Image (tube, rainbow, N blue to C red):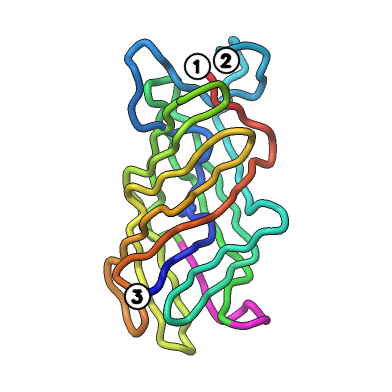
Amino acid sequence: MRLIKTFGLAALAAVAAMAFVGATSAPAETSTQACTVHTSLTCGAGNGTSSIHLVLASGTVGELLANIDVLCLGVLTEATALGLGNPQLIHGVSMSWTGCGTGSAHNNCTVSAQELPLANLLKTGLDEGVLTFTNGRMRTQCPNLGIDCVYDTEGFEFADGGGHLTAVNTVVKELGGKFVCPDEGILDTLLETLTRSYVLG
């Protein structure tokens, strides 16, 4: 079984699609909020953001490394912050992957969200947080190769801060499929917000 480095999921991933809004768990006195302005330790009235758009960071690609490698050239994710909280809840609204394939043409595979994820965003520092998916599924298909794999995105963890959502060595579990679907792998991806978001309280 080989590692899985994937397309931002989230996103599925990324979905993922939420690098600036969800949270795991934090001290009760601390709140987490995605914010459009960073002028203090907390998010001022009216500066909280409810809609977050993420794309694959410039100069990067999404990779699914298994028996056959799949590359995706584009990722677009939209998420909604469900309110101030500890953690703040984030809901994936849409996730799309484009330019996916096993060769230079990047056109013989598709990646899709079967179940859009919910996530928690936990503030860990000034404009720093951890985004954790609490559910979600994504599917990779390459019909000409007989590949049809479904992955569980629950437990995906992303470092959130500086306008970026980063997944490093996040375990990906395969739920079922055909041909060359590994049991699990590793997710590495870098997403960035289209408009700046900050992790504040």
Residue 111 magenta: yes
Where residue 121 appears, as percent x and y from the top left, is 43, 32
- Dots 2, 1 in contact, CB < 8 A: yes
**Mark on residue 201?**
1
> Which residue is at a point 34% across and 17% down the rendered structure image?
27
Q: CA distance from mark 2 to mark 1?
A: 6 Å
Bounds of the magenta span? 103-112
Left or right: 16 in relation to 172: right
Q: Residues within 10 Å of mark 2 (few under 14, many from 20)?
A: many
Q: Is residue 136 above or below residue 89?
A: below
Q: Residues within 10 Å of mark 1 (few under 14, many from 20)?
A: many
Name the kind of residue labelled 2 in the image.
Cys
Tell me the quadrant of the picture where the N terminus can be found: bottom left
Q: Is residue 179 above or below residue 18?
A: below
> Which residue is at a point 41% across and 81% down the rendered structure image?
147
Find residue 82 and report its image quarter: top left
- Dots 3, 1 in contact, CB < 8 A: no
Where residue 128 appears, as percent x and y from the top left, is 53, 29
**Mark on residue 4?**
none
User: Which of these two is toward me, 67 or 108?
Assistant: 67
User: Which of these two is toward me, 196 or 51?
Assistant: 196
Name the kind of residue labelled 1 in the image.
Gly
Q: Is residue 3 above or below residue 68?
A: above
> Which residue is at a point 57% across and 12% down the rendered structure image?
41
Q: Earlier in the sequence, mark 2 or mark 3?
A: 3
Left or right: 159 in relation to 72: left
Residue 91 magenta: no
Where residue 192 appears, as percent x and y from the top left, is 64, 44
Where residue 154 appears, as percent x and y from the top left, is 32, 50
**Tag 2 residue:** 43
**Tag 3 residue:** 1
The tally of labels here is: 3
